[in-house]
Amino acid sequence: MKKLLTLMCLAVGALSLAAPLQAQETKMLIAYFSWSGNTKSIAEQIHQKVGGDLVEIEPVRPYSRDYNTCLDEARQDQVNQARPELKTSIDNMARYDVIFLGYPNWWATIPMPVATFLEQYDFRGKTIVPFASHGGGRLGQSVTDIAKLSPQSTILEALSVSYGGGSSLSSDIDDWLDKNGLKK
């Protein structure tokens, strides 16, 4: 009986050590597209909190720095379902388990460079954690559109951030990470 009890204690101890190790081995990528810098700032804060790799999704042909011209370009890309060529390249997407995906809400959805990114890689079996900056449109239909472009992935609860998030951004990110079970 003592041997059985000892073996059970060793097994439970081994399991309790394996769980944190497994969580530490989760490879995370924070990929984001940012025009004004708001989404970039959010991505950098997430990166500070969860670690992993941080990558900006950059189109070969950038959008205009003029706000109104950018709106027109973004709308035209959306109407045409354009897939702008990207400068960004991920060498080994297969190594990532969790992909935080950041973007501004443009015309109630993801910017077309984000669509290109989602179609460029295989997200089958991966977990995608969306986060969006917006000027009042919240998430729009962006999460639905992400799911359509990566149907064999798991999409967790998205974070919606008004503009740059303000003074509560850090705690909002903490709460969101906690809800999604991703807090370090």
Image: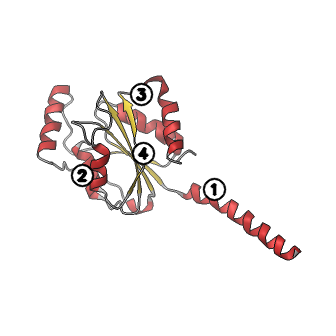
Q: Residues within 10 Å of mark 2 (few under 14, many from 20)?
A: some
Could you tell whether 145 is left or right of 82 in the image? right
Report the disc number at residue 20: 1
Residue 157 circle label: 4
Q: State which mark lies toward you, 4 or 3.
A: 4
Q: Identity of the amino acid at label 3? A: Gly
Q: Which residue is mark 2?
A: 116
* Place of residue 40 in the rendered image (x, y in percent of width and height, measured from the top left): 37, 36
Q: Are marks 2 and 3 in contact (CB under 8 Å)?
A: no
**Which type of secondary structure does the marked residue at label 3 adopt?**
loop
- The earlier-in-sequence mark between 1 and 2 is 1
The amino acid type found where label 2 is placed reads Thr
CB under 8 Å between callouts 2 and 4?
Answer: no
Question: Rounded to the nearest whole Å, what is the CA distance between mark 4 and mark 3?
Answer: 17 Å
Residue under label 3, please give it: 165
> Closer to us: mark 4 or mark 1?
4
Return the disc, 4 or 3, that comes first in the chain's sequence. 4
Point out the tag, 4 or 1, that comes first from the N-terminus: 1
Q: Residue at x 24, y 36 (%)?
A: 106
